[in-house]
Amino acid sequence: MHIYYDYQIFTLQNVGGISRYFIELASKLPRRFPEIKTTILAPVHINDYLGSSSVDTIGRKIPMFPGKHHVLTPVNLFASRFLLKKAKPDIFHETYYSLQAQAVSAPRILTVYDMIHERFPEQFHGPDLEIPVLKAAAVARADHLITISHKTCEDLIRFLAVPPEKITVIPLASSFVKSSADTGKQGLDKPYLLYVGLRQGVKNFSTLLVAYGHSESLRSDFDLLCVGGGKFTATELQAIEDCGLSKQVKHVQASDAMLATLYSQARLLVYTSLYEGFGLPLLEAMRCGCPVVCSKTSSMPEIAGDAALYFDPLDEEEMQTVLEDTAQSEKILETLRIRGYKREQLFSWERCVEQTAELYRSLL
């Protein structure tokens, strides 16, 4: 059985969760099941993972440049059509959403990661407004769909009226490795609460800023460290200053190794999103022994289970109370840490690979 993965996500991401997911699948499937061969068809791409992986790849990495998506998509579409005529895959797995369909006779699979654009259309602008249309087209032509959580499955049925029997739920896993690297103090003079990832829109960072800022005990005992998501914008810096938090709220960019260490040294991870299709930072934190508090919406309770404490992400007072009660209790933190280790073990790439292979076989 020969599985082909298309170029789409590898022309959109140089690094990122979705492209990492396909690298994990494509590299681990042949090792677990020798009768399966995998190939990523990305004639011209910008992805950092492909070059350092063992995956059979047809393509070449080029430097990123402005307007790359407008150029790379038609080039890859044309080149892939030519290459697929000779390839004759047994399964064709699309890695993202597009209007253009490759002419293949093999069963066509699509993974749907979330329905955030359909749930919160007011949060998106520019090219992102096209994603629901692209997604609907890709969903319609797929022979079968994978969702990464039951909540995403429910939303897919609700918004696009997909028959349930056309969907298989296959959760993701964490690729994080515990690190003993010394990160230094990162400009922090005291213990810290950790926030990871983007901060705008549904990520709901502004509510965390208010909840943290209104708590005298949190401000005095803990810094708030934000990792990734780009530097603070001028608007964010002004909001931080208005809350009187310029000395307490920090930002750093971090490699995976550094982030793993930051997880392991954090008082807790605060995950305030209004909506997540899965929420990988929850598993990353648990693997590294970091207690978790998060929103009780969308897929987050499904992923974190009893290994997190929850708040209403729109209720500043409830968020503040949960943060205070958790951060100041050694007993609660240790309980969450132990539960987190156990919970994270329920999600593995081995299980993801086995379930995906089973689906592929069922479609032949």
Image (cartoon, rainbow, N blue to C red):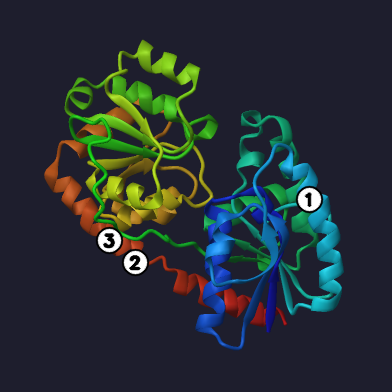
- Is 11 drawn above or below residue 34 in the view shown? above
Q: Amino acid at mark 2?
A: Gln
Whole-percent x, y for residue 129 in the image: 72, 35
Residue at 23% over, 36% down: 185
- Is 274 drawn above or below residue 30 in the view shown? above
Q: Amino acid at mark 1?
A: Thr
The residues tagged by marks 3 and 1 sit, at their Cα atoms, a distance apart of 41 Å
Q: Nearer the viewer, mark 3 or mark 1?
A: 1
Whole-percent x, y for residue 174 in the image: 42, 60
The residue under label 1 is 73
Describe the element under mark 3 as helix, strand or loop. helix
Rendering quarter of residue 120: top right
Rendering quarter of residue 128: top right
Task: Judge from the rendering whether residue 213 lies leftward or rightward of residue 171; answer left or right.
Answer: left
Describe the element under mark 2 as helix, strand or loop. loop
The residue under label 3 is 341
The quarter in which the C terminus is drawn is bottom right
Task: Judge from the rendering whether residue 234 lies leftward or rightward of residue 270; answer left or right.
Answer: right
Is any atom of residue 158 visible in this view? yes
